[in-house]
Amino acid sequence: MAGQTGGTAAKILVFDSGLGGLTIYRELVRRMPEAEYLYVADNAVFPYGNLADDELVTRLLALFDILIEREQPDICVIACNTASTIALAPLRDHFAVPFVGVVPAIKMAAEQTKTGLFSVLATPGTVKRDYTRDLIARYAADCEVTLVGATDLADLAEQFMRGEKVDPGKLLHEIAPAFVEKGARRTDIVALGCTHYPLLTDLMRNIAPWPVNWIDTAPAIARQTQKVLSGLAQGGHGASGGAANRLIHTGQNATIAKVEAFLRKVGITAIYRDEIIG
């Protein structure tokens, strides 16, 4: 059965620098409700874009040394574009547990665009990385791609999670550069390059200059996770079902307390603070 290994419920560790990865966690739960979930938010150093690449790799290797030994997950999902582009390969090289990462949906956007104009809405860190430009060169060479580094969109998403009203003017300011007109052609797809952003899709759709297809990678990541789990011959560290879905965060309790209602809404039933590596 999907979401199970070795006859017991799979244990899935979902990791992000903050809470944006809850969009992927939510899709995983929708597809594999019988699995046991641990969401780890390394919000003590959020956002990861502020760290040097080698510093981030060192931190993630240290975190997962402890997490994998202690939690014994069957699979780890890196629900963060920055962490995936920088540290996914070192994590896979270092650990036997399978890792699934997330990258901007450039290939998908290139396949779906009808006008040849699409945009990637991401964090400034994701936009400036060679990895992103390599994806464009490989999969979207025949398209005109606009890269938009949104400085405040992730913060607006976290504001939304806290139940606060999101200013439509600020939101429009963040997304407006993604809407491009060239003659009779317009942007017809916006690929969301940060896991926070799907939380705001409905709001963005309502204020967008014109209708576009907003591509969220969460369904594809959930399908890939399910596929990898189904191919595991051994495993089953998880419980036999009914286990609490937990969240561990490395930052301040006051930060998480503000979004506790949202966490309960998406099925997180136990919340802990743990520096993990101090």
Image (cartoon, rainbow, N blue to C red):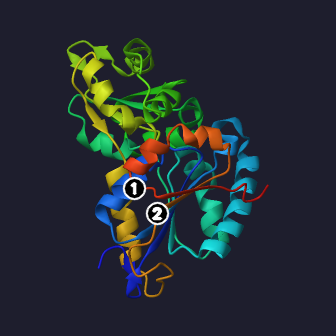
Q: Residues within 10 Å of mark 1 (few under 14, many from 20)?
A: some
Number of marks drawn: 2
Quadrant containing the N terminus is: bottom left
Q: In the rendering, at what x and y percent does residue 40 appear?
A: 57, 56
Q: In the rendering, at what x and y percent does residue 198 appear?
A: 37, 38
Amino acid carrying mark 1 in the image = Gly
Q: Which quarter of the figure has residue 140?
A: top left
Depicted 206 relative to depicted 239: above or below: above
Q: Residue at x 23, y 19 (%)?
A: 210
Instruction: Name the residue beneath numbered marker 1.
Output: 267
State left or right for residue 137 relative to residue 89: left
SS state under label 1: loop
Q: In the rendering, at what x and y percent does residue 126 appear?
A: 55, 37
SS state under label 2: loop
Amino acid carrying mark 2 in the image = Asn
Q: Are marks 1 and 2 in contact (CB under 8 Å)?
A: yes
Instruction: Name the residue beneath numbered marker 2.
Output: 245
State left or right for residue 78 relative to residue 165: right
Residue with the most extreme right position: 278
Q: In the rendering, at what x and y percent does residue 203 appear?
A: 31, 26
